[in-house]
Image (cartoon, rainbow, N blue to C red):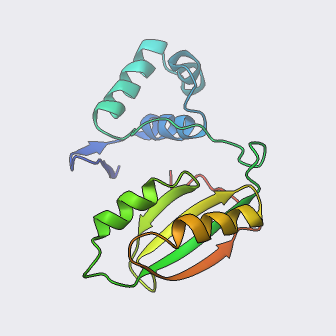
Amino acid sequence: MRPFPCEDAVSLDLDAIDRALVRALAGDATASAGALGRTLGLSQPACWRRIQRLRAAGVFRGARLDLDLERLGFGVTVFLGIKLATKGRVSLEDFERAVRAIPEVQVVDHVLGAFDYRLRVVARDLPDFERVLRRRIMTLPGVGNVEANVVLSEERRPGPL
């Protein structure tokens, strides 16, 4: 079995049951240890101990809600590539702090390539996105070139587990 790297650089050997447990919790983080145990052929206490061991090792960083943004009134998602114009005069921390304060920005990725940052922005519609872009994003410290890609559809895949 291959070791599974954890955040604190400690290696944790995961067996097939641990991997199945991680997959199950990635699909439904609210599942109880009893229900997971029944599915995986474990007692509730044994399953709970495994979950606690994985949590203590840093495998789980938290649980999140998977929101239906469209039902909440956010019908447009846009990926923005941001190239900073003045890297030397504006610190990356200043830009990151300012962009994190914009509620429509869901994800801020510092990236290597044609852009310095990749943002995931949600808006109610295209006019709302234009307002966010003009009034909030384009006024951030150091913003130079901006490229927008509107999401037409999205498919989420479970990942390599």
Residue 65 point in image, percent of width and height: 59, 37
Q: In the image, what residue occupies the spot 65% across and 56% down? A: 156
Residue 52 point in image, percent of width and height: 35, 25
Name the residue nearer the viewer: 74 or 18: 74
Residue 116 in which image quadrant: bottom left
Q: Is residue 157 above or below residue 12?
A: below
Name the residue nearer the viewer: 6 or 14: 6
Residue 12 point in image, percent of width and height: 28, 42
Q: In the image, what residue occupies the spot 55% across and 24% down? A: 36
Q: In the image, what residue occupies the spot 72% across and 61% down? A: 128
How many numbered marks does the figure carry? 0
Q: Is residue 13 above or below residue 142?
A: above
Residue 97 in which image quadrant: bottom left
Instruction: Answer left or right for 10 relative to 115.
Output: left
Name the residue nearer the viewer: 116 or 59: 116
Q: Is residue 22 above or below residue 136?
A: above
Name the residue nearer the viewer: 113 or 139: 139
Instruction: Answer left or right for 66 relative to 161.
Output: right
Q: In the image, what residue occupies the spot 76% across and 47% down? A: 73
Can residue 154 be seen from the camera position used here? no
Residue 94 point in image, percent of width and height: 32, 64
Can residue 101 be seen from the camera position used here? yes
